[in-house]
């Protein structure tokens, strides 16, 4: 038996060796960049016509492909750029850097100006949507400003929790299950003004990629999705400024060379000022934001580049000086790209991320500060072994510093005493390896493994409980309540309180049926060690992150997806259909009446449950012509269950499955853009979603003169259906002007037919009549706006 196993292993090694080294090959490599700015292009295609194979550039515009000796026609293309063809004789390794232009007249080589967006047929990558800055800017705009988050909300499988709510939900996952990266740095809250704007300035963005499934092994720490966004590097050839002046906010961005063709800078800022008009009307309420993007890049030589990028943003929401909420992100990333040789590319990053969340409750004299900081070291390598076999591997290590809350009085008359909830610390290292392997002309697979570890660290005093249960169950009242600690255990600085480790396999398969269609399947396991402690039904919002420990377990996800992808009618249309199923272990659930503000023992109000989500997604695109756009539809179900921990316990919702708070059975989005003339273009977005799950009272009983509601199953009801239509018109007075001052006017109407979408419903007793009544809260009606955009 041992000899037989050794024989199989030898045959496998010989097969891999023969696949990789069967024929002497040479390497064609280089970078693809924008000719006007020398900005590298992510995802540009390098295609070898004679062999009908190709490769795409990585996150830094680098490509590498190994080919037998010979003469080849190389086609280089990128969406919104003219395609370029060159003939290359390959008899040794060749480094070829190529610049693409948006103006075909500037090119000397053969040009194919029609470059359409196509569904990816050959690669096993699925459940992925990618958009360039140019594509995002061509979308219909709302409030006069292009928005990255608004663009992904038009994709299948992506929803929001309604107007006035932050974040987004992917395939039934909660907002904290999304890993949001800006130049590799973690963004913990992606919204301004509670979801009305995103923190991403579209003028500063180069590329965006959303992974909903089949997530590569280099990503970890979240369950539902990865939103990977890269900022522009800045123009290395000329100085330019871009900006916009609107009714609600304005923005400005400057970029240019530090050293021509070698180094560049980019700095941009945005701010809203609608609150100033409220002040003029003697309105004490305020809601505004501001942010700053910056990036420096420098090419040391052909093999080394360094980058320094940062972001800082803040939101402030104030109601008559009695309730103030301030929150925002600050990130900084220093990166070094190194090219070892034509086939091995590396990127090392040192990242700092800080998320702050603060509340000030003037009516009780309380100030609350909380936040999370992390320090992240990443080292990633991309190895182009052959044209059929590529490896990604690397490591990252994150150190977390949590501040659950600092409570302090706001004045001398406050009854609040200063208090510091014990800070928490954690360390999360991980290793990964990912391979993409073309087995045959029609079959390509990707497979990888991530090994993640998590260490919950001291210094901290941890409560101990009877039977190790911080949540007690009252058998008589059939309710959960806080357990009384039996004592405490002290862990010194750096001592391990709890530790976890998980193997996270990933696999994807793509089978090409013909040149226009393919079927794909994927599986991935993910582990999430951080949890967002939030309860949107509480009187005051809360946004506190907590690490896994002895009581709050890491969430674990398994997801499978199967899809069909087709380009048809000469790639004028694309169709993507996917179905998915995923299940989550250790999903956090809150006991009824959970108190989260200034809670020193959060484990006393949470239970570990499970969740599941499944659905069908359809995306139909029209890629060419004066009218372009897409239709997306999602049919899905998201449920949660927290059964009793022992016989006799009821669990949450009597232990039955119930709809999660972000379950949306139907989600339809229609996005269209029409180029009427060179001067006028129009756009529209129609969105329709099933109403958000809610718990309504089933009846009342009378206690004295008060009607007390009796509630039914958790999330057994829904708010009314959510829908609205947004339209925009863009007027460019001088469309042929490519240099000097260039301007455009953007006219838009949010919620054209003034739909009063329900954000929440409350049930109360009328003070005058004593009758029971329901009150519906709507946040936004119809909002017109005008913005003037410019660049020079």
Image (spheres, rainbow, N blue to C red):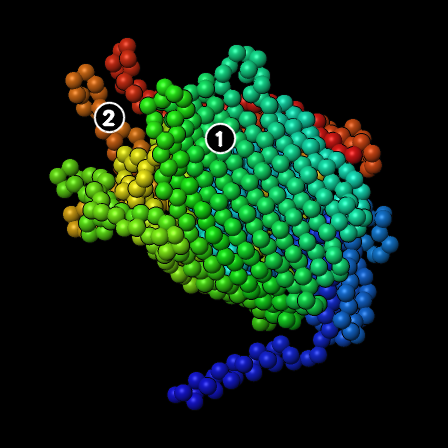
Q: Position of residue 397 (x, y in %)?
A: 50, 57
- How far is the residue under mark 1 from the one under mark 2? 34 Å
When the figure is inspected, residue 105 is found, relative to residue 712, above or below; the finding is below
Q: What residue appears at the point 55 percent right and 47 percent down from the top-left corner?
A: 352
Q: In this rendering, would 622 be left or right of 357?
A: right
Q: Position of residue 705 (x, y in %)?
A: 19, 16
Mark 1 secondary-structure assignment: strand
Residue that badge 2 annotates: 709
Q: Position of residue 53 (x, y in %)?
A: 68, 66
In what quadrant of the picture does the C terminus appear? top right
The reply to whether residue 529 is visible in this rendering is: no
- Tell me which corner region of the image, top left, top right, bottom left or bottom right, holds residue 47: bottom right
- Sequence-first tag of 1 and 2: 1
Q: In this rendering, would 365 be left or right of 747?
A: left
Residue that badge 1 annotates: 326
How many numbered marks does the figure carry? 2
Q: In this rendering, would 766 be left or right of 445?
A: left
Q: What residue appears at the point 49 percent right and 48 percent down from the top-left corner?
A: 374
In the foreground, 22 or 753: 22
Q: What residue appears at the point 65 percent right and 48 percent down from the top-left corner?
A: 308
- Closer to us: mark 1 or mark 2? 1
When the figure is inspected, residue 125 is found, relative to residue 70, above or below; the finding is above
In the foreground, 160 or 423: 423
């Amino acid at each position: 038996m041992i000899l037989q196993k050794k024989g199989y292993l030898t045959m496998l090694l010989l097969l891999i060796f023969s696949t990789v080294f069967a024929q002497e090959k040479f390497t064609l490599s280089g970078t693809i960049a924008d000719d006007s700015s020398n900005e590298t292009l992510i995802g540009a295609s390098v295609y070898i016509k004679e062999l009908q194979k190709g490769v795409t550039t990585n996150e830094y515009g680098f490509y590498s492909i190994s080919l037998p000796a010979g003469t080849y026609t190389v086609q280089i293309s990128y969406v919104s750029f003219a395609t370029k063809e060159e003939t290359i004789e390959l008899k040794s390794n060749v480094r070829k850097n190529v610049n693409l232009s948006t103006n075909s007249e500037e090119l000397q080589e053969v040009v194919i100006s029609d470059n359409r967006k196509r569904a990816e047929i050959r690669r096993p990558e699925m459940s992925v949507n990618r958009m360039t800055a140019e594509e995002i800017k061509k979308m219909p705009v709302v409030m006069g400003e292009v928005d990255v988050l608004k663009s992904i909300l038009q994709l299948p499988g992506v929803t929001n929790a309604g107007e006035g709510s932050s974040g987004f939900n992917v395939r039934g996952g909660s907002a904290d299950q999304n890993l949001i990266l800006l130049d590799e740095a973690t963004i913990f809250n992606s919204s301004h003004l509670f979801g009305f704007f995103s923190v991403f300035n579209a003028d500063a963005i180069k590329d965006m990629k959303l992974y909903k499934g089949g997530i590569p092994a280099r990503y970890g720490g979240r369950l539902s999705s990865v939103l990977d966004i890269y900022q522009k590097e800045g123009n290395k050839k000329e100085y330019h400024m871009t900006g916009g002046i609107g009714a609600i906010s304005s923005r400005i961005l400057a970029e240019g060379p530090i050293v021509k063709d070698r180094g560049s800078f980019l700095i941009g800022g945005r701010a809203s000022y609608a609150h100033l008009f409220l002040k003029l009307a003697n309105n004490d309420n305020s809601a505004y934001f501001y942010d700053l993007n910056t990036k420096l890049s420098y090419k040391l030589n052909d093999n080394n580049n360094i980058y320094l990028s940062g972001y800082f943003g803040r939101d402030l929401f104030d109601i008559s000086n009695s309730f103030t909420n301030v929150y925002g992100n600050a990130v900084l990333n220093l990166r070094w790209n190194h090219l070892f040789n034509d086939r091995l590319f590396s990127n090392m990053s040192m990242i700092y991320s800080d998320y702050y969340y603060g509340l000030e409750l003037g009516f009780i004299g309380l100030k609350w500060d909380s936040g999370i900081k992390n320090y992240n070291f990443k080292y990633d390598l991309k190895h182009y072994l052959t044209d059929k076999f590529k490896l990604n591997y690397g490591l990252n290590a994150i150190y977390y510093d949590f501040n659950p809350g600092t409570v302090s009085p706001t004045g001398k008359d406050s009854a609040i005493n200063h208090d510091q909830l014990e800070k928490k610390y954690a360390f999360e290292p991980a290793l990964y390896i990912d391979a993409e392997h073309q087995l045959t002309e029609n079959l390509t697979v990707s497979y990888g493994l991530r090994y993640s570890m998590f260490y919950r660290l001291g210094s901290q005093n941890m409560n101990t409980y009877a039977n190790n249960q911080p949540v007690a169950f009252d058998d008589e009242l059939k309710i959960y309540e806080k357990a009384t600690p039996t004592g405490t255990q002290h862990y010194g600085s750096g001592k391990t309180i709890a530790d976890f480790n998980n193997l996270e396999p990933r696999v994807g398969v793509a089978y090409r049926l013909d040149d226009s269609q393919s079927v794909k399947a994927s599986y991935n396991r993910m582990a999430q060690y951080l949890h967002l402690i939030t309860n949107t039904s509480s009187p005051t919002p809360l946004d506190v992150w907590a690490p896994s420990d002895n009581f709050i377990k890491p969430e674990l996800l398994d997801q499978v997806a199967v899809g069909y992808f087709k380009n048809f009618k000469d790639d004028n249309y694309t169709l993507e259909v996917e179905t998915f199923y995923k299940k989550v272990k250790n999903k956090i659930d809150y006991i009824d009446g959970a108190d989260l503000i200034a809670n020193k023992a959060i484990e006393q109000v949470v239970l570990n449950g499970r969740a599941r989500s499944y659905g069908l997604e359809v995306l139909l695109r029209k890629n060419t012509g004066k009218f372009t756009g897409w239709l997306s539809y999602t049919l899905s179900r998201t449920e949660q269950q927290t059964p009793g921990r022992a016989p006799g316990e009821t669990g949450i919702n009597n232990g039955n499955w119930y709809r999660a708070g972000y379950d949306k059975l139907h989600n339809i989005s229609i996005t269209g853009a029409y180029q009427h003339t060179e001067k006028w273009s129009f756009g529209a977005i129609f969105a329709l979603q099933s109403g958000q799950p809610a718990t309504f009272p089933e009846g009342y009983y009378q206690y004295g003169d008060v009607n007390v509601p009796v509630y039914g199953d958790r999330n057994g009801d829904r708010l009314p259906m959510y829908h609205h239509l947004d339209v925009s018109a863009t007027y460019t007075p001088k469309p042929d002007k490519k240099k000097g001052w260039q301007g455009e006017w953007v006219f838009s109407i949010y919620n054209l037919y003034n739909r009063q979408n329900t954000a929440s419903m409350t049930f109360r007793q009328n003070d005058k009549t004593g009758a029971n009544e329901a009150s519906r809260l709507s946040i936004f009606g119809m909002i017109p706006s005008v913005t003037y955009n410019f660049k020079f």
